[in-house]
């Protein structure tokens, strides 16, 4: 069954390369090159994902099996949610898309819908504030662009 891990590792490696390439397409920040720009975090994620996927390819678990039961369905739902999250990040903005994605994932893990989406909304606002004010990195506001301060 080591074949399953290798397939998954190859898929994750393709995702890591695509993610790193996508980060390289970010426009250069105003004011020239910075030590830490908007592409830094995605580059780090792509590197970690790439190294992890290489580990799966080289050293697969000898007795794993694909979870074709309810767990497999939940994993597929989580992947679909994350794809939609990435697609809706620009049009809806970070806070709204994060609230929807985190809320949906929490709900799928068994939380009550109200608590799940409250957690998503709080997570979106807190992370947005951390990135915007503590790290001085901008995230898309999308639907909430009226909150942007000039």
Image (spheres, helix red, strand yellow):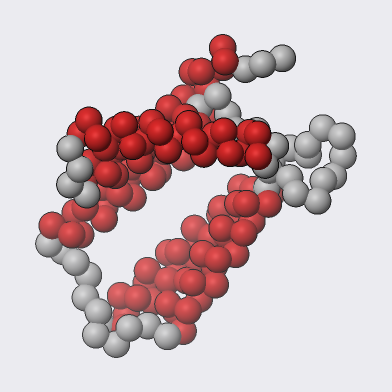
Position in image of residue 97 (x %, y %)? 42, 32
Q: Which quadrant would the C terminus be assigned to in this image?
A: top right
Q: Position of residue 62 (x, y in %)?
A: 29, 87
Q: Position of residue 76 (x, y in %)?
A: 26, 52
Depth order, front residue of 100/8: 100
Residue 137 lies, in percent from the top left, at: 67, 37
Q: Is residue 48 left or right of residue 25?
A: left
Residue lying farthest right? 32
Above/below status of 148 relative to 82? above
Q: Quadrant of residue 132?
A: top right
Question: Among all residues in the image, which is located at the extreme left?
Answer: 69
Residue at image position (51%, 18%) is 144
Seen as rendered, the residue at the extreme top is: 146
Q: Confirm whether residue 21 shows in the render.
A: no
Q: Is residue 19 shown above or below 122?
A: below
Determine the residue positioned at 24% across, 85% down. Answer: 63
Q: Does the rendering let one see residue 20?
A: yes
Which residue is pictured at 58% across the width and 39% down the height?
130
Q: Is 45 on the left-hand or right-hand side of 39?
A: left
Given residues 110 and 74, the one toward you in this image is 110
Question: In the figure, 11 relative to 63: above or below?
Answer: above
At horizontal 22% and vertical 70% (from top left) the residue drawn is 66
Q: Quadrant of the N terminus?
A: bottom left
In this figure, what is the number of numbered marks?
Answer: 0
């Amino acid at each position: 069954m080591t074949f399953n891990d290798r397939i998954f590792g190859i898929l994750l490696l393709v995702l890591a390369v695509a993610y790193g390439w996508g980060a390289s397409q970010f426009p250069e920040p105003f004011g020239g090159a910075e030590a830490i720009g908007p592409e830094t975090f995605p580059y780090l994620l792509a590197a970690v994902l790439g190294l992890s996927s290489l580990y799966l390819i080289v050293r697969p678990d000898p007795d794993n099996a694909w979870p074709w039961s309810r767990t497999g369905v939940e994993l597929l739902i989580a992947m679909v949610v994350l794809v939609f999250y990435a697609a809706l990040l620009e049009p809806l903005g970070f806070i709204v898309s994060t609230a929807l994605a985190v809320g949906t994932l929490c709900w799928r893990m068994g939380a009550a819908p109200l608590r799940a989406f409250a957690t998503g909304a709080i997570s979106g606002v807190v992370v947005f504030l951390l990135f915007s004010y503590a790290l001085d990195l901008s995230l898309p506001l999308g639907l909430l662009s009226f909150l942007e301060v000039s």
